Image (cartoon, rainbow, N blue to C red):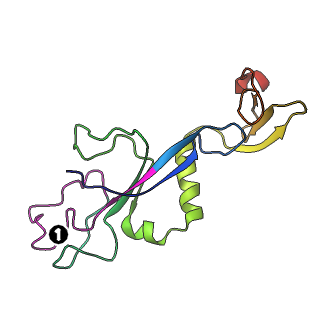
């Protein structure tokens, strides 16, 4: 049985930036209910909080195992493997892990920024795109590099040059 409940699934730019021809990936918000690991007597976790190595601390609940906030919300991409040497419930590489209170109080704009940043990783951020006459697009990155997108669905077919070829 899983400790997660799917809250939502949305598509995000695969590399964290939206531009013509970018690929999209599903991001899934997985909620961990407040009773999981709760120190409240009667919740079944009197011997300690399981999952403490990869989830935020457990939360106090009422006698029914309910609380104002979830214990955590874990954000993963579709197909992210679950199950590590530490725990069968741990995702291998979550994009982001928030406490339930953080999730309940974060604006969607801030959540979007954090998820796109996690998807981008160490790659430079897209800062502009130029639609070329006759088709194609040139993508400009914050590190001064550029990439030609000739083969995107929106702008036609062709080959793709790497960022280093247009530096």
69 or 48: which is nearer to us? 69
> Where's residue 52, x and y in %?
24, 55
Please say if 40 is above or below 17.
Answer: below
Residue sitting farthest toward the right: 133
Q: Main secondary structure of the magenta part?
A: loop
> Where's residue 56, x and y in %?
32, 60
> Where's residue 100, x and y in %?
37, 67
Left or right placement of residue 65 versus residue 158 in this view: left
Please say if 65 is above or below 48.
Answer: below
Looking at the image, which residue is at 24% across and 51% down? 2
Quadrant location of residue 13? Answer: top right
From which residue to which does the magenta span run? 28-55
Query: On the image, numbered disc 1 is attached to which residue?
Result: 39
Looking at the image, which residue is at 70% across and 24% down? 162
Q: Is residue 30 magenta?
A: yes
Left or right placement of residue 41 versus residue 56 in this view: left
């Amino acid at each position: 049985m899983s400790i997660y409940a799917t809250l939502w699934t949305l598509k995000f730019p695969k590399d964290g930036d939206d531009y013509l021809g970018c690929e999209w990936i599903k991001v899934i918000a997985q909620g961990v209910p407040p009773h999981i690991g709760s120190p409240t007597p009667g919740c079944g976790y009197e011997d300690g909080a399981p999952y403490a190595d990869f989830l935020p601390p457990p939360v106090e609940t009422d006698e029914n195992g309910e609380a104002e906030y979830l214990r955590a919300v874990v954000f993963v991409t579709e197909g992210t493997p679950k199950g590590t040497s530490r725990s069968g419930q741990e995702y291998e590489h979550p994009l982001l892990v928030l406490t339930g209170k953080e999730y309940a109080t974060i604006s969607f704009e801030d959540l979007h920024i954090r998820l796109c940043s996690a998807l981008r990783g160490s790659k430079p951020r897209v800062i502009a795109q130029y639609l070329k006459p006759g088709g194609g697009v040139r993508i400009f990155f914050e590190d001064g590099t550029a990439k030609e997108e000739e083969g995107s669905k929106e702008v036609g077919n062709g080959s793709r040059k790497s960022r280093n070829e247009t530096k």
